[in-house]
Amino acid sequence: MRSAIPFFWQPKGVVPSLEALPLCKHVLQKKDVTFAVSEKLPQEHPLLVAELAGGKVIGDLRLTATADNLVIGGVQTVFGCSNPDGHYVLKRHRFRLPKYRHGTALLLGASNSDNYYHWLLDSLPRWKLLQAAGWRDYDFVLLHSLPRQFQDQTLDWLEVPASKRLRCSKNFVHQFERLVVPSMPFPTEEVSGWVCEWLRSLVPARTSGLEKLYLSRRGVCGRQLANEAELQAALMAQGFVPVQLETLSVTEQARLLSTARCVVAPHGAALTNVVFAPPGALLVELFHPQHKNRCYANLAAACGHHYASLDGCAIPQGNGKRLENTVDVSAVLKLIEANCQPAGGKFH
């Protein structure tokens, strides 16, 4: 019986990527599935799947390592890190218990896959890579320790049995008889078109439905729009329908967005669902001036959508715990008018 004595796990070294991982007794095979997935991918980001004998997952999907504790760069927490051997997570000391399991484990979740955006775009598409490499027989699919309903709902789409979904606790070094590790689906801070096409293929689109949507953050903590009532009333006068996507299942969200031609929303995870909108839709993103990034502009470009954004005006908060702002309602309406050109009842 293997010891269950807690210990400080430490890496024996770092290899920068799956491509650089040498074949040896611990690395049984590597498959390049780039062209099986898409012929349009950049050569600098090949899509590989590696099979490791005795491969390890450290904590809640933080790191992946070989049986002799060589950390693999380019995946999990060190994804997008130009100097993975200097990453703070490799220097973190934590008592962990060793846990060994017989059978084959497929690494699906990334270290931030408890977040809806990162789950849908960074983690779930790795299933296509695993399938392209021929991995249809398995004992475990590895997930983040924090359970999320959207994870289980989308895994139902893929027909992954609930009994094979294994959540990896931060308290363990998880070791498997066989660990199968896929690349991340696209370079950091980018989105690939094949991911958008594949996600849309998982949920049949509606033939008709709502075309103008306002995605509210009313039911979400943080980054509230203080004058949302004014904005919502103005948008409803233009035919927009307000929705709170967190009240819907992922399937319901996907089907709702599948007919959307114009989406207005404050920056937030709900905007990930524009991946299900038909190409050519318009996304108008409203930013808190202190909380901005390009992730949804990149997603819109990968989907073939049009994109526009507007910065709001921050409201000082005494407790410092909430980010609230107001938005110029007339500026939002002008932005929609400038970018939405109705043609036969559609937007293009």
Image (cartoon, rainbow, N blue to C red):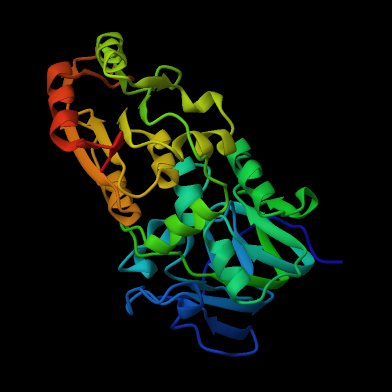
Image location of residue 58, percent across then percent down? 58, 59
Residue sticking out furthest to the front: 344
Residue at the right extreme of this rendering: 1
In the picture, the quarter occupied by the N terminus is: bottom right
Where residue 336 sits, quadrant-wise, is top left
Query: Can residue 110 be seen here?
Result: no
Foreground: 296 or 222? 296
Q: Residue at x 57, y 52 (%)?
A: 202
Q: Is residue 304 left or right of residue 275?
A: left
**Image quadrant for the C terminus?**
top left
Which residue is at 55% across, 76% downward? 49
Residue 71 % position (x, y): 50, 71
Q: Position of residue 103 (x, y in %)?
A: 79, 69
Say whether residue 311 is left or right of residue 254.
left
In the displayed structure image, the side of residue 17 where residue 170 appears, left or right = right
Number of labelled discs?
0
At x 45%, y 81%, the residue is: 19
In this rendering, the answer to whether 270 lies above or below 112 is above
Q: Is residue 312 above or below residue 49?
A: above
Q: Nearer the viewer, residue 177 or 85?
A: 177
Q: Nearer the viewer, residue 307 or 95?
A: 307
Q: Is residue 294 visible?
A: yes
The x, y position of residue 62, in whole percent, is: 52, 56
Displayed quadrant of residue 8: bottom right
Give left or right: position of 229 versus 127: left
For image coordinates 79% across by 63% down, the residue present is: 3
